[in-house]
Amino acid sequence: MTETQDSLRDCLAPAKLNLFLHITGRRADGYHNLQTVFQLLDWGDTLHFKRRQDGRITRTTEVDGVPAEQDLTVRAATLLKEHTGTRDGVEIDIEKRLPMGAGLGGGSSDAATTLLALNRLWKLHLTRGELQTLALKLGADVPFFVFGKNAFAEGVGEALETVQLPARHFLVVTPQVHVPTAAIFSEKSLTRDTKPCTIAVFLAQQATQNGWPDSFGQNDMQAVVAGKYAEVAQVLKWFSGIKTSITPARMTGSGASVFAAFSSRAEAEAVQTELHEVQPAWRSAVTSSLDTHPLFAFAA
């Protein structure tokens, strides 16, 4: 990241993985109660911010299918400006790498990075707790990225507790399909009664799996998505033939991305090479775990 008095450049908005995702119930307001562990990655979109003195908030790059007024970065900046009354504005430039509708948290991470970056650039000095409260108005995953550490999450994803996870490397594969989260949550066949667990149970099982947490629980959405989208089922089937991953592959979020963990980056890259030879149309990335958000220090 490069910082000047009037700009912040090369700000990583990291992707996330859901190491497991349990749906434990449905609330009266229609939202679902979840339990998950969020894992930050060293891969994501890159955002650039330049202060404007005229108070305007603008996005200087086009994002396919996302008008500026609907972009979560613009919405985050507008929310922060209205909340604080600052007279500053900002130009936002986005280098988009994360596929949309993939379960990697791309838009949510962009929004959180915007809140953290502008808290610094606009000299607002809001606490992390204040930013997380604002973040929840933008989406259920946004508070996690503001929280900025790997976390055991409950509620709709806003109740967060830090967890220590081992360093490892991932191959993330995304077929050419967009999975709408709301539609999957609406499916009648979706399991909504998984028995709640505790963070202590998760940590205890992690200790019995040679330090690898990726075999705990399941993603309750995976069977539904794989049944509706043959492309996701094909990725899962392809991963089942890979013997060098630490644990079996799993879908993240509501899909469509599928990931597997490896003990070394070289092993993940070797499998990615195999993938390119047999399925060149699938998008893939080799990425490593992160312990904290790169802009973690921008809020107390």
Image (cartoon, helix red, strand yellow):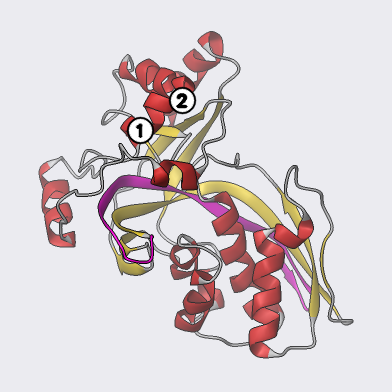
Q: Dividing the picture into quarters, in which one does residue 58 lie?
A: bottom right
Q: Residue at x 16, y 56 (%)?
A: 196
Whether residue 267 is visible, yes or no, is no
Any mark on residue 224, and which? 1
> Crowdedness of circle 2 by 10 Å Cα count: few (<14), some, many (20+)?
some
Whether residue 169 is visible, yes or no, is yes
Residue named by callout 2: 229
Q: Which residues are magenta?
A: 1-30
**Left or right: residue 182 compared with residue 166:** right
Q: Dividing the picture into quarters, in which one does residue 249 lie?
A: top left
Secondary element at image label 1: helix
Q: 171 or 28, which lies in front?
A: 28
For badge 2, the amino acid type reads: Tyr
- Residue 186: x percent and y percent? 41, 45
- Residue 150: x percent and y percent? 36, 59
Secondary element at image label 2: loop
- Residue 181: x percent and y percent? 48, 45
**Left or right: residue 84 compared with residue 141:** right
Q: Is 183 in the magenta?
A: no
Instruction: Name above or below for residue 144 compared with residue 238.
Output: below
Prevailing SS of the magenta stretch: strand
**Left or right: residue 45 compared with residue 86:** left
